[in-house]
Structure formats: C-alpha cells, structure tokens
Amino acid sequence: MHDLSKQMTRSSTPSAAATSHRFGRITLDVRQSLPPWKQAVFVGGSLLLGLAISVWILALAGISPPQLASELAGVVSADSLRGVLVQAAPLILVGLGASLAFRIGFWNLGIEGQMIFGGIFAAAISIYEIGPPSTRLLLMGIAAATGGALWVLLVAFLKIRFRVNEIIATLLLNYVAMYFLFHLLYGIWQDAKTAFPQSTPFRPFERLGDIGYGLNAGLLVAIGSVLLAGWLIHLSRVGFYARFISANPRMAKIVSVPVQAVTLGLIAASGACAGLAGFINIASQEGRLTQSFSNGYVFSGVLIAFLSRNDPIVIAVVGFLIAVLFITGQTLQVFYQIPFTMVQMIEAIIVMTVASSEFLVRHRVRWIR
Amino acid sequence: MNDFLINWIANVPVTAVPYALAALGLIISERSGVLNLTAEGLMLIGALAGAGTCLTLGGYPALALLVAMVAASVVSLLFAVLVVVLRVNQVIAGLSVVFFCQGLTGLIGTLAKWQNKQIAGLGSLTIWPLSEIPVIGRIFFMQDPVVYITILIFFIVNFVLFRTMLGLKLRSVGENPAASDAAGVSVTLHRILAIVAGSSLIGLAGGYISVVSVKLWVTGMVGGRGWIAVALVVFARWAPWPALWGALLFGCVEALIPRIAAAGIRVPQYLMLMLPYLATIGVMIWVGAKDRRDSQEPGALGQPHVREERR
C-alpha cells in the first residue's frame, strides 16, 4: 500500500518531454506491469512496422511489393522449401550460439570467426584424412565444435584475466580468423586443380546428405542442438545457475554456485554451436572450404537470439523465418542484382523497431491537453 | 633502409587520421554517457557519401568531405533517437546501426554503380620552403590539408570539452545524469548534441578514407577501423590527446604493411593484414593489465537516463 501511494505521487510528477502548453504536453509514466496480450500487440506491431519499412526500402531499390510477394511465394513453395530447410540449420545454430552466451551476459559477436575456425578444423580432418571413412563425418563435427569453442574461449580468457572488453575482442578476432582462412585458401590448402581460393572438395562420405523426406542431415544436428540446449536451459541445473549468475553474480558466488565453470561452459557451448554452424555450411551446401561461407551470420545470430528472447525452442522457429529471408535475399541477388548485404539491413531494421517497442511496454505515453 | 623508414613515417599521418578523427568523435559521444559502437557503420556512411559526391560532381573533394560529415550526422540521429529518447540498450542499438549502415551502403553503392571507380581526390599540400628540409620536410610539411585540420580539430574539441560551459554540461550529463537534470541541464538535449557532433567527425574519418587516402569506394572498405577506434577510446581513457597518440601508433602499424611488401620482404601477406587487429587486442590487454586509477571513464557510460525512474 505504501509502495502504491509512492508510485502514485511519482507518476504524477511532470515529465521529460513537455512541449508547448498551447498544444498540451506529452507526459511519460513508468508502468508497473502490462498484460501479456498488450505486450504481444506492441512487439507484433513493431515487427510489422519493421517489415513495412524494409518493403518500402526495397521498393525504392526497384523491387515493387507485388514482385517481392511473388518471389517470397516462390521461396516458400514446396520445391524450394528444401533450400530453406538447409539454410535454416546454420542459422538456428548461430542463434543458439549467440543466445547461450547472452544468457550469462557475454556479448559473443565473434560468431563468424568461430564459424571459420569450426570450418577450418573440420576441413583439416578431411584434408589430412584423419580417422576411418565410417567415423569421418562425426570426427569433423566434433573438430568443428572444438574449433569454435577454442576460438571463443580465447576471448573469455582475455576477459577474465585482463578485463578485455569481449564485444571488441570478438569482433576483431572475426577479421583475424578471416585473414587466417585466406592464408590457408590462397596457400597450402588451395585446390591445385581449379586454382580458385577453395579447398579440394570433400569426399562423398564427408558431406551431410539428405536423410529422406527432403530433409538435410544438417537440420537434424541443429534440431538436436536445440533440444539439448532446451534441456540445459529449462530443465537442468545449469540453466538455473545461469539465471542466478546473470541476476546477481556476487550472491551466486556467496552461495557457492560454480560461477566460473558455468560461465566458461556456456561460452564454450556458444562457440561450439557457431563452429558446428560453420561445419554444416561447408559440409551440406558448399562441399568444400570456401572464402565466404560465414558471411552475414554475426548479426543473424544476434537477431535470432534477440527476437526469441534467448529461448532455445523459439530460436528454431525464428531461425526458420530468417532462413526464408536469407533465401529471398539470394534470389533477389541473382535476379535483381540487389547485394546480399540487404539482408543485414532488414535484420537491423527489425531489431531496431522491436527493441524500440520495449519503450512502450515500459512507459505509458500520454498526451495531456 | 633510410628510404624505407622515411617512406613509412611519411605515410603514417594518412593512415592515422581516420583512427584519430573516429576516436575523437566517439570520445565526444561517450563523454556524454552514451556508449557508442556505431563508428564502423557511420564511417561507411561517410566513405560512401564522400565518394558519391566526388563521382556525381566530378571533383570538389572539400565539399565531398563536408557531405560525408553531414550524412553521418543525419544517420546518427537514428542512433540518438533509439538510445536517448527510446532508451534502447546501447549495445543492441549501436550494433543495429552498424549493420544497418553496412547493408545500406552496400545497397546504395551497388545501385548507383559507384563501386571501384577512381576519384580525383585531394592532393597533398606542400608548405614551401619548409617542405625542402631533408627528411622532416617530407614527413611534416608535405601532407594533405586534412592532416593539419585534424590537429586543429583536436585543439578545438579539447578546448570545448574542458574549457567551456557547453563542455562542462556535456561531461556532467555523462558523469551523473540525475544530478545534471536536477541542476537544470537537459540530459536529452546534450546527449543528442554530443552524438550528432561526434558523428560528424566519424563521418569525416570515413570520407577521408574514400576521398583522400584510397580514392575509390568499395563495399565494406572501412574494414574494422571503426571497431579499432572503439578500442582506441578505451586505450586513451576517454581523453582526446592520448587518442591522437594511439591513432599514430595504429597508423604506424597500418602504414607498415604496404611498405614491407614494397620493400620486397617476403612475408605471408594475409598474416600481415592481421597486424592492426592483433595490435589492437594487444593494446587492450596492456590497458587491462595495468592499473586504471587515472581513467576518465564517464560514470554513467551506457546507462540511459529516465527522469521518472530517478531514485
């Protein structure tokens, strides 16, 4: 009761953005709570607004909405849905990777670098023919996850030991990873036959093929990871610890939650997911190590984790939708010469509008005459 | 060996200017309490706007640099509205703006067919007779005008930030927004002003890359320099002059790469290209490892101010 009366006096104080009194003024109150359906309306509305802005920009770039609609219909039609599902696998994994790190407040923006190192580790298994053919693919997957995890743990070490900001460190290491990939692809790993900056193609047993019903094995890996992460976050002790640590790290330490182990474990899992995404990309789509298999995944990971509020199960759904966006982007690139970076722009617009809707969820804006 | 050294050092200002201007722009914005990660994107906007102006008008590099500044400021308004008015998480908003700018500049550059087209650009200024002094003349008195203007800008910004009322208000808003608000200083206004003013310098940094140093537009040509500038701000501990020395350090590293190739020293080129990024991480480790008591990090960096939530 006391709190409520304090709140009443607080919300009646004059507000920040007061305009001319002749037209009344705009006041701002901090909301105590908002029914879930209203929150959904705000988030849904902002999502639609973001999409509308994107459609408008594409129209300015020369793709009319009817053209766009027919391209979209083509993408989700039965025969190209296969492509969408293949594309969904790495996107779900990068979304999962980003979300696992975000859960304990670690900004992993090095997803592209971790994908590259996942790809390099997997390709090394293939190039140096490690292990018998029957277990080669499994070995490549494990190597990829290890590569991605090691690349992000380097930053985790720098953060813990030297307080290096992980946002900048992970972003900068993307460039380092890219140049290391170029060093290999223009050097010792270059395919001698084609002289292109690519590795030699993987053998058939080193590729992720179809597993029936038009589904790619990569998607199976992604769904498996989603279920594992869902169990980890929602059912296991680790998920509880992660919530505890991000809410109050000092208290977590005092009641002897294994802070260091959980933090490092989730960061490593985040890198491992990104590494697996790199492996799936080269083993299912390209069939060899290429220069650009990780392009455009950093912000996709951030977007998918952000829109699904770090919930592993929702990530699978959002990842699929972003895959539709990716394939549409590739179609527009081929038929309308729209650069693929357009996909990043649309992703950024959606993040901006949805993040802005939070303002309406938290504040009540009123116009008083 | 002497030639190698002189060539190298004479090229340092050209590679250092983008870092210096971008870091200074970020310092202005962060001093007002806004954690600014937008440099990479706004530099791209500046670079595209500068190159586009030069290609459309066929010259006028000075005007192109001005357009680059204005364009970056206009786009930064988007960031300002997101973080200051709508109180979006500053990391999320900054990243969105960067990737929005990457997409937008890629789109415009391709549709307008500005890719890979040579620009006349801005020549260097020869300050005769000082330029005739051996060694020193080449290094100090044969640079392009922007190099000299950059030093002037550092003096001006330093003066405004630390010797004027406007600078005091701007820093107080970054140090303790609630107290500033109570004292009648508009937090919203000063933060927006700081973001827009800082972003014009970031735009100039980008325009400098495309118009003066590289003299053409390529998609994504800023190549991580914006992120290095963000790290440079931490290295400089939010103070302008150390940022200039830091920029010269990174300029040295970047200018070294083509010099080594030109001198015919055989080193793997892609491993050489990693140098600026590795140097940045090295510097950040050095900053983290030593004592930070004299840091001027703004007290309220990264925190949105909501008057109604004031305690």
Image (tube, helix red, strand yellow):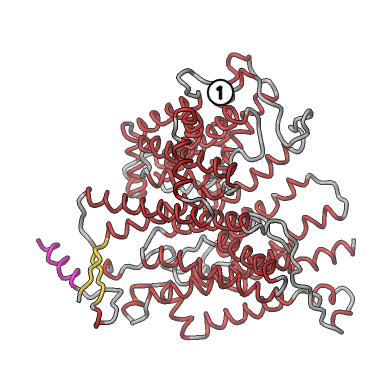
Question: Does residue B65 lie above or below B184 as drawn?
Answer: above
> Residue A3 in the image: x percent, y percent?
14, 62
Q: Which chain is indicated by disc 1?
A: A
Magenta portion: prevailing SS class: helix
Query: Which quadrant would the N terminus of chain A be assigned to in this image?
Result: bottom left
Which residue does the image show at 24% across and 63% down from the upper left? A364
Residue B239, quarter of the rendered image? bottom right
> Residue B241 in the image: x percent, y percent?
62, 74
Q: Is residue B78 left or right of residue B243?
A: left
> Residue B12 in the image: x percent, y percent?
75, 66
Queried whether the magenta region covers residue A181, the answer comes back as no
Instruction: Please give the range of residues in magenta.
Output: A1-12
Secondary element under disc 1, as helix, strand or loop, is loop
Residue B104, quarter of the rendered image? bottom right
Q: Residues within 10 Å of mark 1 (few under 14, many from 20)?
A: many
Q: Amino acid at mark 1?
A: Leu
Queried whether the magenta region covers residue A2, the answer comes back as yes
Front-lying residue, B246 or A138: A138
Q: Is residue B233 left or right of residue A190?
A: left
Question: Does residue A152 lie above or below B172 as drawn?
Answer: above
Instruction: Please say whether residue B68 is visible from this viewpoint.
Output: yes
Front-lying residue, A155 or B268: B268
Which residue does the image show at 46% across and 42% down from the upper left? A98
Which residue does the image show at 49% across and 67% down from the upper left? B76
Q: Which residue is mark 1?
A: A208
